[in-house]
Amino acid sequence: MSGHKCSYPWDLQDRYAQDKSVVNKMQQKYWETKQAFIKATGKKEDEHVVASDADLDAKLELFHSIQRTCLDLSKAIVLYQKRICFLSQEENELGKFLRSQGFQDKTRAGKMMQATGKALCFSSQQRLALRNPLCRFHQEVETFRHRAISDTWLTVNRMEQCRTEYRGALLWMKDVSQELDPDLYKQMEKFRKVQAQVRLAKKSFDKLKMDVCQKVDLLGASRCNLLSHMLATYQPAWARWLGIWNLKVLTKMTCCC
């Protein structure tokens, strides 16, 4: 008898959690919809419930920041590539113009124009070499966005759905508890049923909450590794172009003087 009494509450909990009746589903959907409406309209929610998700909300802010900044970075790289091509073209045209004018001018100024024009033409060719690491950088960022960020985004969406279900169940239990009379068997049965729904929703929500936190932490670390690796590839190319440009200009100016 004692063993039967110990297992009775768990049998009840399983039975309530597996309640698939149409009425139960309609009640559940009603409170989920009410919770979604509260969130959409920005109405104040229970401060203790909100505070319990503070760590999760902080992770979500980090995720949305990573999502937004990676998109901005991708757009900036594309714009940077276009500007490099345009600048290289203009630099090459200016170099050709100075060289042509320098050939016509037989004075020292003409020699300086020829030297500067030659340096500008060479610099424009070297500037285009920056596009290779930039293209690679852009491809890596896009891969990161469409794989890592998209996968985390799907998990966040599932978590938000479970959070709405969980908070909707809490609203349902709060509503039932306000009218609860422990002496009435039907009301106690109804309360236990809602309580089982809350426990089931919380179990699913807690699992996805942990998944989201872990994925966001991993996403942040992966982004740092990506940026470190790609900048390590790009910076030498930039430094090489800058060094060549300074060396060429100084050499030509020295020779002319």
Image (cartoon, rainbow, N blue to C red):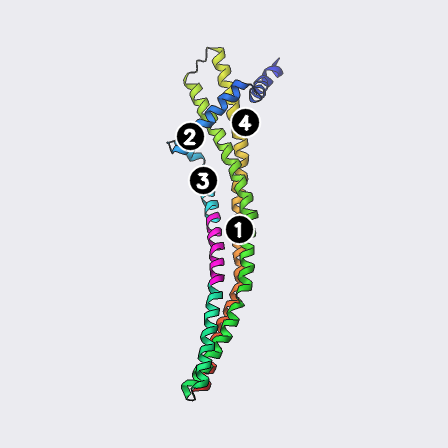
Residue type of the residue flagged with mark 4: Leu
Between marks 4 and 1, how big is the CA–CA gap? 33 Å
Kindly report the secondary structure that dominates the magenta region of the rendered protein: helix
The residue beneath circle 4 is: 200
Between marks 3 and 2, how big is the CA–CA gap? 19 Å
Residue type of the residue flagged with mark 2: Phe
> Of marks 3 and 4, which one's residue comes earlier in the chain?
3
Location of the C terminus by quadrant is: bottom left
Q: Position of residue 143 (x, y in %)?
A: 57, 51
Rendered position, 211 above or below 81? above
Label 2, residues with CA under 10 Å away: few <14, some 14-19, many ≥20: few
Number of numbered discs on residues: 4
Callout 2 secondary element:
helix
Does the segment drawn in magenta span residue 75?
yes
Between marks 3 and 4, how big is the CA–CA gap? 22 Å
The residue beneath circle 2 is: 37
Q: Position of residue 89 (x, y in %)?
A: 48, 69
Residue type of the residue flagged with mark 1: Ala
The residue beneath circle 1 is: 221
Tell me if label 1 and label 3 are in contact, CB under 8 Å.
Answer: no
Callout 3 secondary element:
helix
105 or 142, which is in the foreground?
105
The residue beneath circle 3 is: 57
In the rendered structure, which segment of residues is drawn in magenta?
67-82
> Of marks 1 and 3, which one's residue comes earlier in the chain?
3
> Of marks 4 and 1, which one's residue comes earlier in the chain?
4
Q: Nearer the viewer, mark 2 or mark 4?
A: 2
Q: Position of residue 84 (x, y in %)?
A: 48, 65
> Of marks 3 and 2, which one's residue comes earlier in the chain?
2
